[in-house]
Image: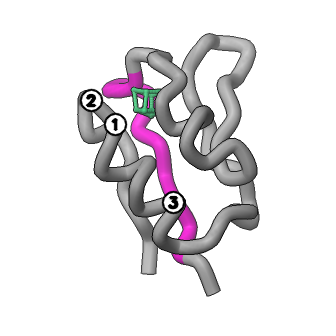
């Protein structure tokens, strides 16, 4: 099963990269910051690519 992602809204700058890369696992909320969708709808490498591509390392993965 794909690990659940967690977005730290304090760090997120709303760039949208995670949504572009893994749109079934992240969305931008009304506050313009990313939110992790539960459950994540992308496979793990896709979610991982979003984690790795976040410019402010706001996304972490929960085991
Ligand atoms: S990639 Fe990072 S900074 Fe950009 S919207 Fe996603 S969580 Fe926020």
Inter-mark Cα distance, 1 to 2 = 4 Å
Residue range corresponding to the magenta coloring: 3-12
Q: In the rendered view, does 39 fall on the left or right side of 52?
A: right
Q: In the rendered view, does 46 fall on the left or right side of 11?
A: right
Lower sequence index among marks 3 and 2: 3
- Could you classify mark 1 by the number of other residues whose Cα lies within 10 Å: few (under 14), some (14-19), or many (20 or more)? some
Q: Are the residues tagged 1 and 2 within 8 Å (C-beta)? A: yes
At which x and y percent is residue 57? 26, 40
Circle 1 SS class: loop
Residue designated by label 1: 54
How many numbered discs sit on the rendered protein? 3
- Could you classify mark 2 by the number of other residues whose Cα lies within 10 Å: few (under 14), some (14-19), or many (20 or more)? some
Residue designated by label 3: 47
Is the residue at mark 2 in contact range of ligand 1, meaning its CB lies under 8 Å from it? yes
Circle 2 SS class: loop
At which x and y percent is residue 12? 40, 25
At which x and y percent is residue 29? 70, 23
Inter-mark Cα distance, 1 to 3 = 11 Å
Q: In the rendered view, does 31 fall on the left or right side of 21?
A: right
Q: In the rendered view, does 38 fall on the left or right side of 20?
A: right
Q: Note whether 45 is above or below 53 in the view shown.
A: below
Q: Are the residues tagged 1 and 3 within 8 Å (C-beta)? A: no
Q: Is 5 a magenta residue? A: yes
Q: How does the figure colour the protein chain or chains?
A: one colour
Q: Is 57 a magenta residue? A: no
* x 41%, y 65%: residue: 61
Circle 3 SS class: helix
* x 34%, y 37%: residue: 54
Q: Quadrant of the C terminus?
A: bottom left
- Please tell me the numbered disc located at residue 55: 2
């Amino acid at each position: 099963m794909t690990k659940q992602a967690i977005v730290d809204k304090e760090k997120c700058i709303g760039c949208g990269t995670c949504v572009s890369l893994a749109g079934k696992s992240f969305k931008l909320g009304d506050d313009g910051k990313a939110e992790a969708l539960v459950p994540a709808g992308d496979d793990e490498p896709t979610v991982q690519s979003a984690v790795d591509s976040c410019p402010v390392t706001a996304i972490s993965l929960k085991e």
